[in-house]
Structures are given as C-alpha cells and as structure tokens.
C-alpha cells in the first residue's frame, strides 16, 4: 500500500441539513421500507413550480427473466416548460451529447458498451440483487451478495465496460458479479456456466459461477461504492487496472456503529481480485453517527466524492495522491457531472470545486424525502420529486419538466442513467423500476422486485458520461 500523508482542507461552503432523518425511522428509511416525503431546511431550498428560474449562488461555506411484468406507457400528463415530442419508444439512444472527437474503435466502443446494458437493483428484503436488461426491461438474473446470503445490499456500481457490477452490503462486504457468461468461471468444470437466468433462479452463493469474488470488511455500515474507469488500452480495446472505491465508519472498538470516535475509512480495491490496495484512515472526519459514509461517485480523474450521512459533509479523495479534503454540504444521493461539479439529489444543487461554492435553482423541484441524482446525455440532472421525477438544467440551473410516475405518492429513491441515456427510477420499498425516455417521457415499467432501495451508478451511465465527456482543458 502507498503511505498516505493526507491533508484535510475544510471548504467554507454552507452546511446543508440532510433532507431526511435517521434512516431506520422517520422520513429517510435505509431499511428498504416505504417512507413518507421528508422536509428540508428552508434556508437551503424552496419548493417551486416547474417554471423557468435563475440560479442562486451561495459563497463558500425464473428462469429466463419471466417473473414480473413489463409495461410501457406514454405519459401525456408530464409537466413541461418547453415543447416535448411524445410518441413511441424509438429504441436505444446512442446520442452521446458532447462526446466530441471520441468515437468508436475498430474492435469495440471506447465510451460505453453498445452490445448489452443492464441495471442492477438491490432487493433489500431478500438480500439479493436483480440484473435487468435495460433494453428489453426484463429481469435476466438474481444473485445473493454475501456467502451467508445476508448482508442487506444497497449500493451498486457498474464498471465502465459494463462487464461487471460491484455491490456494497450495508452489513459489510463487497461482492463483484460478472455481467456476461463469457467472463464467468466454470468452477465445477462441467462445461457450462451455472448461473441465474431470472428472478426465480437464485443460486447458492458458492454455486453461482458469475460471482467473481467477495471481500469481507469488519464494518457493518458500508454503503458507498464506485468503480474507477481504469486505463484504456488502445491495443486490446479494453480497460485495464480498474479499481473500486468504498468507505465505512467504525466505532471506538473498530466495529459498528460509527460513533464519532474513529472517524471514517476509505478503501481502494483491485477490481480484478477484490484485494484492498489502499486504506485511508481519516480519524478527524466526522462520521455523522450511526450510518457514516453514505454514497459515492467518481469524476473524470477517478477521484471519489463521498457523502457522509447526517454529518452534512462530502469527502473528496484524489486518486493519484490519496490526499483528501472535507467540504461542508450535501444530502441524499451524489453524482459528478461532465464538468467536474458535484451534485446532490432531493432539492438538487451542485458544488463547484474550482470556485468552492454551492449553487442551486431559485425555484427548486419539491423534495421527495431523499433521492439519487443522475445526468442524462443532454446535460440535464434528474432526481425524484413529489409523485415522480424531474430535471434541472446542468448549466443554467433552470428547472425543467416533471414526469409523474405510476405509483404517485412515495419515494423514487433510486435514480440512475444507463449508457443509452434512459433514466431509471426505483420505487422505494415496492416492486417496480421505471425506465423513462428523456425525450418523449415514455415510461416502461418492470414489476417483480422485492423492497428495492438502490441509488448509485446502478446502470453505468455516470462513469461513462464523465469519462467520455471530460471538461475541456
């Protein structure tokens, strides 16, 4: 491991009270159960209608995938601020926005995998993760995420080449699952890959041949997870040396809960083997009590940004040096946009690392009690709002449209984007995941989940976006 000499710089950004309370009760349950919409400190946001607005700047401070039901609807009731074309689903969206000169290599796509696309959603109630084909909107696999079939999985992160997913278990431990049979290991040498084929086909952990590895951790509060891109090999058209970021908060005895006596730990794992390559102990960093580090996202430099539950802080760790800084502010959900700015969901707002300031719309989307956030291929930031999802323009901070979703009330906590540009919204504590066409707002629904919770880069669109569309200069 590298010897870490960490620096801690506290940015003078304003402290944002988290949108939700304790995630075992009240408005922000982290147990996967249904919750009611939470409230937000009036000083950090104000609910508003979906009309154009200017920004406010704050100075520094189974089998065969047959279980469940897939439906497709065109939602004509979406609230719009500009004319939106509606119509039938036209298939995968390969418009990569600001991709510029980056194109397709002779042997495969460098930016995103166009051969397949999956979204990986944790079923908290049964300690499994579902693999859903994002194009056909059917479940094609379901897996346990720890050897003891426990663990309460929540956050998932897809590698840039879409070959694998990494799963963080709330009760500790990271598991890697291969996305395709061709990468799996014929462990029993019977000439076939014995792996799940759908929701009704969950194999014992040690018999599931698409489980690549499991790395246990002493923590039982482990949530953040994010792949790095690795280094693109022009000769093989593959990404080499991929890593995985994760983090945990421990108590005075080195165990859960995080009680503020031992700070937090950030880890960097070898994506191929699961071995812990780096451990960065930050004893002075407030773990926030109980749940500690909560969500993570990488930027185009493979730096990681980690939100710490209830401490109202974000930790930024540099990939190359392992130096870190602590920034005041944050809330449920975290992502990094293609300009290197950090966004948090539920009353969406952004942190500009270059200026050291937080910015948000004057008339924000009404909060939904805690949600993820994702950037689409048109530069719009999507998050859950009351009764559905909505977006804010990444650059102007003008609030855009709201798209109602079928359940109406409740929280669509899991928000992600796939490599084709579709938005995914996972209904907290229910059975459904919705795919939203960002152009027509047509909704396709998968039904068959079991108390899903996931919010993270669960379909791989975020890492593809930041790597393929880095800021100029």
Image (cartoon, rainbow, N blue to C red):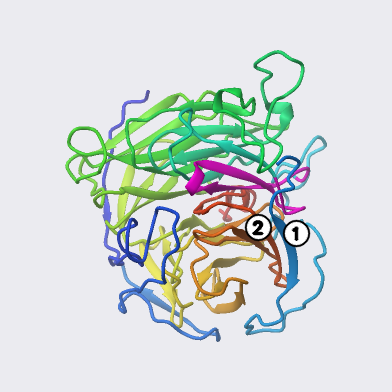
Q: Residue at x 49, y 56 (%)?
A: 335
- Camera sees residue 269: yes
Taking the image as shown, residue 25 lies to the left or right of residue 254, namely right
x and y percentages locating residue 338 in the rendered image: 56, 57
Taking the image as shown, residue 234 lies to the left or right of residue 302, namely right
Instruction: Give whichever of 224, 469 is nearer the camera.
Output: 224
x and y percentages locating residue 19 in the rendered image: 36, 67
x and y percentages locating residue 156 in the rendered image: 53, 45
Nearer to us: label 1 or label 2: 2
Q: Residue at x 71, y 34 (%)?
A: 180
The number of numbered discs placed on residues in the rendered structure image is 2
Instruction: Tell me the magenta residue range.
Output: 114-139
Q: Residue 233 carries which label?
A: none
Taking the image as shown, residue 90 lies to the left or right of residue 433, namely right
Q: Which mark is residue 447?
A: 2
Above or below, comparing residue 202 to residue 236 in the picture:
below
Q: Which residue position is annotated with label 1?
A: 95
Q: Residue furthest top?
A: 189
């Amino acid at each position: 491991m590298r010897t870490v000499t960490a620096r801690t710089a506290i940015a003078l950004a304003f402290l944002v009270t988290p949108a939700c309370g304790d995630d075992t009760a009240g408005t922000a349950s982290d147990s996967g159960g249904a919750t009611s919409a939470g409230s937000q400190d009036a000083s950090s946001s104000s609910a508003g209608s979906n009309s154009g607005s200017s920004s406010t700047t704050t100075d520094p401070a189974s089998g065969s995938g047959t279980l469940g039901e897939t439906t497709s609807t065109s939602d004509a009731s979406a609230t719009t601020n500009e004319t939106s074309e509606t119509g039938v689903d036209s298939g995968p969206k390969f418009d990569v926005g600001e991709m510029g000169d980056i194109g397709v290599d002779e042997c495969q796509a460098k930016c995103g995998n166009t051969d397949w696309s999956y979204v990986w959603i944790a079923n908290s109630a049964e300690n499994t993760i579902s693999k859903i084909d994002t194009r056909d909107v059917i479940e094609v696999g379901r897996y346990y995420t720890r050897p003891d079939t426990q663990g309460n999985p929540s956050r998932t992160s897809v590698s840039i080449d879409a070959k694998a997913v990494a799963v963080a278990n709330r009760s500790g431990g990271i598991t890697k699952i291969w996305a395709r049979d061709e990468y799996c290991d014929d462990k029993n040498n019977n000439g076939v890959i014995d792996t799940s084929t759908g929701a009704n086909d969950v194999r014992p952990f040690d018999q599931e041949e698409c489980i690549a590895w499991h790395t246990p951790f002493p923590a039982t509060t482990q949530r953040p997870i994010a792949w790095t891109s690795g280094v693109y090999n022009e000769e093989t058209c593959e990404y080499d040396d991929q890593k995985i970021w994760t983090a945990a908060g421990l108590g005075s005895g080195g165990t859960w809960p995080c009680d503020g006596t031992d700070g937090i730990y950030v880890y960097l794992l070898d994506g191929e083997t699961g071995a812990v390559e780096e451990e960065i102990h930050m004893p002075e960093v407030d773990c926030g009590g109980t749940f500690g580090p909560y969500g993570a996202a990488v930027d185009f430099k493979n730096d990681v940004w980690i939100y710490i539950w209830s401490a109202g802080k974000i930790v930024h760790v540099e990939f190359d040096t392992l130096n870190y800084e602590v920034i005041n502010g944050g809330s449920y959900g975290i992502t990094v946009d293609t300009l290197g700015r950090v966004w948090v969901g539920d009353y969406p707002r952004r942190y500009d690392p270059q200026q050291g300031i937080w910015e948000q719309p004057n008339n924000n989307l009404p909060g939904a009690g805690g949600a993820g956030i994702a950037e689409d291929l048109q530069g719009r930031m999507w998050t859950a709002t009351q009764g559905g999802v909505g977006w804010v323009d990444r650059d102007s901070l003008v609030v855009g449209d709201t798209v109602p979703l079928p359940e109406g009330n409740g929280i669509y906590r899991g928000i992600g984007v796939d490599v084709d540009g579709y938005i995914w919204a996972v209904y907290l504590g229910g059975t459904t995941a919705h795919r939203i066409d960002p152009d027509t707002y047509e909704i396709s629904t998968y039904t068959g989940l079991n108390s899903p919770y996931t919010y993270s880069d669960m379909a791989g669109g975020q890492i593809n976006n930041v790597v393929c569309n880095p800021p100029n200069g």
